[in-house]
Image: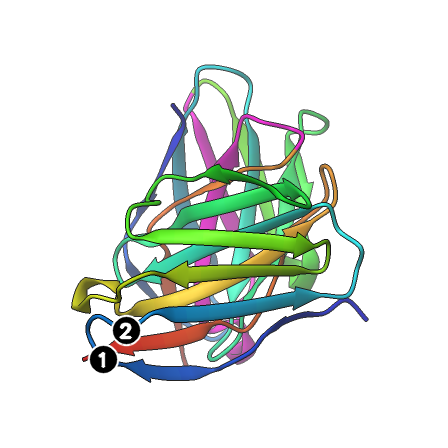
Amino acid sequence: DVKVTQSSRYLVKRTGEKVFLECVQDMDHENMFWYRQDPGLGLRLIYFSYDVKMKEKGDIPEGYSVSREKKERFSLILESASTNQTSMYLCASSLAFEKLFFGSGTQLSVL
Amino acid sequence: AQSVTQLGSHVSVSEGALVLLRCNYSSSVPPYLFWYVQYPNQGLQLLLKYTSAATLVKGINGFEAEFKKSETSFHLTKPSAHMSDAAEYFCAVSEIQGAQKLVFGQGTRLTINP
């Protein structure tokens, strides 16, 4: 069955820490995405990638970067975590114009 | 740029009653429209999608949605609610076919009363 795996379900970090959120898909999908989900705001796109080593900014890229060294893995990096980055982070993958497959999410708390 | 508005952050219906979740979109080109559902502690999964074929789209679990261009709407309906339908529902729009960069609405939390 299709699977998108996010490395942590819950994560607690301190302000100023560098944070890595990892996502792995086993479907050989070209496209991968990072969204953040906040109550009342829905999902907002942070970054996406349509190929290895390729990335494009989404709607809210400030304070984030990404890395895609292998097709199956897409990492989200918070260079210096801040409290306003406390959120649920969702990774997704897709083929060219097929549905998005989502991971279960990582709830990040920055204290 | 495209956008999506979901009317009502919370909707509550009785078991067996009609479910109606409202979605209006804004797009400068013919849109691709989607409904996703998120059950507690899970990621989102696709319910149904509109890609310019039939205007009435049937999805999983008895849900369907109708694309109305004149009203710029894509409302989600189910004739008879079941307790297992309790979840958060997201409408989304895309103008780009390739990478499918979606813009999501704010979400509607559906509660089913016994």
Q: Which residue is mark 1?
A: A14
Task: Identify residue type, mark 2.
Answer: Glu
Identify which residue is drawn at 47% across, 82% down. Answer: A9
B72 over A67 or under it: above or below: above
Q: Which residue is mark 2?
A: A17
Q: Check residue B36 in the rendering and tell me which mark sits there, or answer none.
A: none
Identify which residue is drawn at 34% across, 69% down. Answer: A18
Q: Residues within 10 Å of mark 2 (few under 14, many from 20)?
A: few
Q: Are marks 1 and 2 in contact (CB under 8 Å)?
A: yes
Q: Secondary structure at mark 2?
A: loop
The stretch of residues the image draws in magenta is B71-98
Q: Residues within 10 Å of mark 1 (few under 14, many from 20)?
A: some
B42 over B11 or under it: above or below: below
Question: Is the N terminus of chain B in the top left, top right, bottom left or bottom right quadrant?
Answer: top left
Q: Is residue B114 visible?
A: no
Q: Chain of mark 1?
A: A
Is A43 left or right of A100, judged from the image as shown? left
Q: Secondary structure at mark 1?
A: loop
Q: Is residue A16 visible?
A: yes
